[in-house]
Amino acid sequence: MSRSSRLADPAVAHHYRVETGLARRLLQSTRAERASLYTDLYEQLFREVPWHSQLSARDRTEERELAIRELLDTLRPYLEPDTEFAQIGPRDCVFTARVPRMVRKAWAIDVSPTVMASAAQSAPNLEPVLSDGVSVPVRATLVFSNQLMEHLHPDDAMEQLRNIHAALSPGGMYLCITPNRLNGPHDVSRGIDEVAHGFHLREYSYADLVAAFHRAGFARLRALVRVRGLQFEVPPWALCALERLVEALPRPLSRRVAGMPVLRRVLEVRLIGIRD
């Protein structure tokens, strides 16, 4: 679909204008401003785009249930009765509300009071924690984020990673799932721009995120590949090598190859960092 045909839809055009404008404000902000700006801008987005997927996901029952089951299957090998679990950026909290019954303690951490209100209603033993976008004010054995990293201001991403590392108990792990920039963009600018200009302030490849995890203090890394219900751990360097092969192709071909259904699943970034 061309840029002009995407923007011909009034709802898409309105969402695009609102979100890209707010994203520019966030990118141009100072660290001090962002302490409250994450919350303010997401609340403004939800007010001006009330059909936003984060708010309407509950209405897509079958689709949402399939996604929840897949996430639970992804996490199940790492959830134990003594696990202290924290999800950062829990979206509508429908998934997060399923976890407390499987673990000792569970927190939902987000910048949005709207999302936190949803968390408070989702499960009696799920504790909502309002964050400034980078702090992680809990002590956990397993931290999880899904479609979060790309929403962080690039200057804040490293600070949050270091805070996650500090929040983990020794031997604890952080599982980060984020869309791969090789087949992006994955935000409202998809089909309109070459790179993300909405609230995906930066999209990452495996290579990008491996380097960031190492800088944050994670010495041990694993990657998860999940295809057609099968899940296995692989060394991150193998997926970084695959990315280099794909990126060596001309850009239009590279994007098409990276977007092939199987490669799209293989290249979805699912990186685990373990605190020593």
Image (spheres, rainbow, N blue to C red):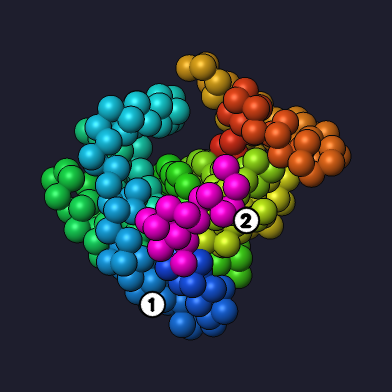
Asked whether disc 2 touches disc 1, contact meaning CB atoms under 8 Å apart, the reply is no
Q: Which portion, as a residue range, is magenta?
A: 1-17
- Circle 1 residue: 36
Q: Is residue 34 visible?
A: yes
**Dot 2: few (<14), some (14–19), or many (≥20) neighbours within 10 Å?**
some
Residue 122 located left or right of residue 193? left
The image quadrant that residue 271 belongs to is top right
| 2 or 1: tag closer to the N-terminus | 1
Counting every numbered tag in the picture gives 2
- Res 110 → quadrant: bottom left
- Residue at the image point whose x is 58% and y is 28% from the top: 265
Please identify the quadrant where the C terminus is shown.
Answer: top right
* Horizontal side of residue 151 vs 131, given as left or right: right
Image height of 76 relative to 104, above or below: above
At horizontal 45% and vertical 44% (from top left) the residue drawn is 146
- Asked if residue 7 is among those painted magenta in the image, a careful observer would answer yes
Q: Which of 198 and 30 is in front in this view?
A: 198
Q: Nearer the viewer, residue 93 or 85?
A: 93
Query: In terms of secondary structure, what is the magenta stretch mainly?
Result: helix
Q: Which label belongs to residue 193?
A: 2
Going by the numbered disc 2, the residue's amino acid type is Asp
Residue drawn where x is 60% and y is 70% of the image: 155
User: Which amino acid, by three-letter code, is at mark 1?
Assistant: Ser
Q: Which residue is drawn at 27% across and 58% down?
A: 50
